[in-house]
Image: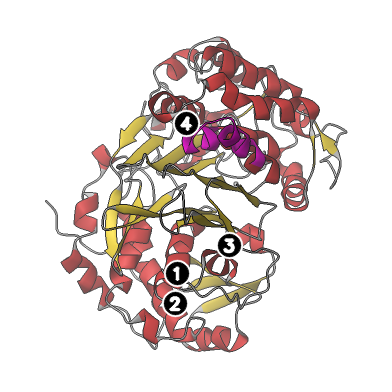
């Protein structure tokens, strides 16, 4: 790809060129991954070390009680890992209605009854066992050091920490873990998390066994029971992550790969399948036509995703049917270039998150994402081992349908890693975090790179929009004002947002420039976060 390395957008970042590289949303996590590469580890070792460090460095987005997904290129082929958690054995619609009343439609947003079995730690272990080079315990060392010694709080993390505190301070374990002086830490203050260091050391020494049925699982069971929850050590012991075949969809001579349902990655594939029918390169990159058709394609994608996507065994259509070329062509015909629309679902023919990416000079590349879902997740923190627990159970429905809660079932998931190939060979490992912003970010940045030849850092820095519902969209304040006005005139209900972090996600990108030992990689880290690319 002959990128244009002129960046037309205000930014504090430049693309980084290296043969071994780690891109994360916190510098200490990038350095943790780089340490593993210096020790002779590979991209998988680097990703796991960085992911463990991120649970400490950015607890507003993830923790030791997170879920995770990964797509990795092992040097020969692509692999997908679904490490999203499952519902405890007691969870049924009746369980929640007995506790919270007949009128409830979802499990709670916060508290112990929002916690499904976390899968991230099992994902780390599975990746290490299958593809890692270094001992698993070595991969936990940087995170343990950071948790014990502490780190100085950066700007964006502090902002979100303070914003979450009023809602979560009363949740069990939250104040003890995250309000060390009775308040959120200030920018530049030292934060230590010694309980999490104990948890990480137990995970390291047992290679995850302590977490899934051992002392950590037992501590979580006790903590949950004391606070009205029903999750048990047996639920943890029964958990296994799943290796899966990524879905793929061609776009401009490349193939974008996403994890199949229960995640929403298919939304990006649907949207790109629709955009394939339009001459995007013939429209000005930041103009109203280009942005309008992307917004409408994304709306069509979400209309189908929100109706059909769930745990695969519960879906009434398959992912392949949702991606059928003829079906997507029929959906593309619904787009009116002069008017915004509120689309319903079609009828396919039946038959708070962190993202990081790593690559090494052998050619291995890893696209990895883990999340506590909404900010600090459930707000609950098991105190002995510092396990900050996700609230992914809130994504279940209590109503009949494909996403209705059931024992051992996985909920609809928002977190999605992405991977790009061309002619069966790796091109880019990337992702954009942020709830339903993720497939929107995957699509918007990829269109910029493939249709408009913007380099990864420019594509990352460019102003974004975010579709919400109906005709409502948010746009970043730096988007061209004439474009914003034109979108409004077409019927989009536009709100200009100043808080880029909150609404528009943050991405990390590694583009393979050629032979990793000679041309290496081009990497980018989103300026909307505190992140960094580290490489050598």
Mark 1: secondary structure: helix
Q: Nearer the viewer, mark 4 or mark 2?
A: 2
Q: Which residues are magenta?
A: 31-48
Residue located at (42% from left, 21% from top) = 90
**Viewer-side residue, 200 vs 264:** 200
Whole-number angstrom distance, CA of label 2 to CA of label 3: 21 Å
Q: Position of residue 391 (x, y in %)?
A: 55, 37
Whole-number angstrom distance, CA of label 3 to CA of label 4: 33 Å
Q: Which mark is residue 452?
A: 2
Whole-number angstrom distance, CA of label 1 to CA of label 3: 18 Å
User: Is residue 107 shown to the viewer in this render?
Assistant: no
Q: Nearer the viewer, mark 2 or mark 3?
A: 2
Residue located at (49% from left, 79% from top) = 492
Q: Name the residue furthest left.
A: 351
**Quick one: label 4 or label 2, which is nearer the N terminus?**
4
The residue labelled by disc 3 is: 504
Whole-number angstrom distance, CA of label 2 to CA of label 1: 6 Å
Q: Please say if the residues under marks 2 and 1 sit with CB atoms less than 8 Å apart.
A: yes
What crowding class fits label 3: few (fewer than 14 Cα within 10 Å), some (14-19), or many (20 or more)?
Answer: many
Is 470 drawn above or below residue 323 in the view shown?
below
Q: Which mark is residue 320?
A: none
């Amino acid at each position: 790809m002959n990128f244009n390395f002129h960046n037309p957008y205000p930014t504090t970042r430049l693309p980084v060129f290296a043969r071994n590289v780690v891109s994360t949303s916190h510098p200490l996590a990038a350095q943790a991954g780089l340490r593993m590469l210096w020790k002779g580890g590979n991209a998988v070792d680097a990703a796991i070390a960085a992911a463990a460090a991120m649970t400490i460095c950015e607890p507003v987005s993830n923790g030791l009680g997170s879920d995770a997904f990964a797509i990795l290129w092992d040097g020969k082929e692509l692999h997908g890992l679904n490490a999203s958690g499952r519902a405890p054995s007691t969870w049924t619609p009746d369980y929640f209605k007995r506790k919270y009343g007949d009128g409830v439609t979802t499990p709670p947003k916060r508290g112990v009854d929002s916690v499904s079995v976390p899968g991230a730690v099992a994902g780390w272990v599975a990746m290490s066992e299958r593809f890692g080079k270094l001992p698993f315990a070595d991969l936990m060392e940087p995170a343990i050091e950071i948790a014990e010694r502490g780190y100085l709080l950066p700007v964006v993390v502090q902002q979100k920490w303070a914003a979450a505190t009023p809602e979560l301070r009363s949740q069990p374990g939250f104040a003890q873990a995250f309000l060390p002086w009775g308040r959120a830490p200030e920018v530049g203050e030292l934060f230590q998390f010694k309980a999490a260091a104990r948890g990480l050391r137990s995970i390291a020494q047992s290679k995850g066994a302590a977490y899934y049925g051992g002392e950590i699982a037992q501590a979580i069971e006790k903590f949950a029971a004391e606070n009205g929850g029903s999750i048990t050590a047996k639920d943890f012991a029964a958990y296994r992550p799943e290796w899966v075949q990524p879905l793929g969809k061609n776009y401009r001579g490349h193939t974008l790969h996403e994890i199949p349902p229960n995640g929403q990655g298919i939304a990006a594939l649907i949207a790109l399948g629709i955009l394939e029918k339009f001459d995007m390169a013939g429209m000005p990159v930041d103009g109203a036509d280009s942005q309008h058709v992307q917004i409408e394609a994304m709306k069509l994608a979400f209309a189908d995703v929100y109706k059909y996507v769930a745990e695969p065994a519960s879906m009434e259509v398959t992912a392949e049917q949702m991606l059928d070329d003829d079906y997507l062509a029929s959906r593309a015909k619904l787009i009116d270039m002069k008017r915004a629309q509120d689309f319903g679902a079609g009828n396919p023919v039946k038959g708070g998150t962190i993202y990081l990416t790593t690559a090494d000079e052998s050619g291995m590349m890893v696209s990895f994402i883990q999340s506590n879902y909404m900010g600090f997740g459930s707000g609950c923190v098991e105190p002995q081992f510092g396990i900050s627990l996700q609230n992914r159970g809130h994504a279940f429905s209590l109503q009949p349908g494909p996403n209705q809660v059931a024992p051992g079932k996985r909920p609809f998931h928002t977190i999605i890693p992405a991977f790009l190939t061309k002619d069966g060979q790796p091109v880019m490992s990337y992702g954009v975090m942020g709830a339903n912003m993720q497939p929107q970010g995957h699509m918007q940045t990829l269109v910029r790179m493939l249709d408009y030849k913007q380099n990864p850092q420019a594509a990352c820095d460019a102003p974004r929009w975010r579709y919400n519902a109906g005709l409502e969209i948010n746009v970043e304040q730096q988007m061209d004002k004439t474009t914003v006005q034109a979108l409004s005139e077409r019927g989009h209900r536009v709100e200009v947002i100043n808080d880029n972090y909150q609404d528009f996600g943050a991405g990390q990108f590694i583009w393979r420039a050629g032979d990793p030992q000679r041309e290496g990689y081009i990497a980018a880290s989103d300026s909307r976060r505190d992140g960094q690319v580290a490489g050598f």
